[in-house]
Image (cartoon, helix red, strand yellow):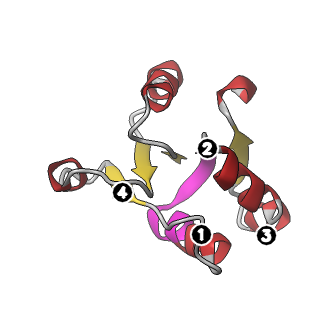
Amino acid sequence: MNILITAANSASAYRLKNQLSDNNIIMGDYMDLPDFMLKPGKMVRLPDPKSVSYTHEMLTLCLDLGVEALYLLRPQEMELIKQSEILFNEYQIKIVAGVNEI
């Protein structure tokens, strides 16, 4: 089972990663990430929530990466994805908004 945690450039994302203690965790962010962080494969660049097709881009990325749980740490991401939670559920992708719902 792969887990995708957003807001990879924040301390809360790394705290969550340590709490989950799973080897199949992928960190991602749409904000600037240094290229050296993206090369190892456990960090991905996410679509920008300002994109009109953000939800579909995120769903495609989750399916490509085999994600079964998506932890959304930024309010803008949460708001957009929660509107399409049924779509993600159809593909057995669990949406978890924020770190308080672990």
Q: Earlier in the sequence, mark 3 or mark 2?
A: 2
Q: Residue at x 47, y 70 (%)?
A: 64
Estimate how packed mark 1 is, as few (under 14), some (14 to 19) or many (20 or more) residues with alpha carbons within 10 Å: few
Secondary element under disc 1, as helix, strand or loop, is loop
Q: Amino acid at mark 2?
A: Arg
Q: Is residue 22 visible?
A: yes
Q: Nearer the viewer, mark 1 or mark 4?
A: 1
Q: Earlier in the sequence, mark 2 or mark 1?
A: 1
Estimate how packed mark 2 is, as few (under 14), some (14 to 19) or many (20 or more) residues with alpha carbons within 10 Å: some
Residue 2 location in percent, x, y? Answer: 49, 48
Q: Which residues are magenta?
A: 61-71
Q: Residue at x 72, y 40 (%)?
A: 97
Q: Earlier in the sequence, mark 4 or mark 2?
A: 4
Is 68 one of the magenta-colored residues?
Answer: yes
Q: Residue furthest bottom?
A: 53
Considering the image in quadrants, where does the C terminus appear?
top right
Q: CA distance from mark 1 to mark 4?
A: 18 Å
Q: Nearer the viewer, mark 3 or mark 2?
A: 2
Instruction: Give me the disc on residue 19.
Output: none
Residue 93 location in percent, x, y? Answer: 68, 56
Q: Answer above or below: position of 99 versus 72.
A: above
Q: Is residue 1 visible?
A: no
Residue 25 location in percent, x, y? Answer: 43, 41
Q: CA distance from mark 4 to mark 2?
A: 16 Å
Q: CA distance from mark 3 to mark 2?
A: 20 Å
Name the residue that disc number 3 marks: 87
Q: Amino acid at mark 4?
A: Val
Q: CA distance from mark 3 to mark 1?
A: 19 Å
Instruction: Give me the disc on residue 74.
Output: 2
Name the residue that disc number 4 marks: 44
Name the residue that disc number 1 marks: 50
Q: Amino acid at mark 3?
A: Leu
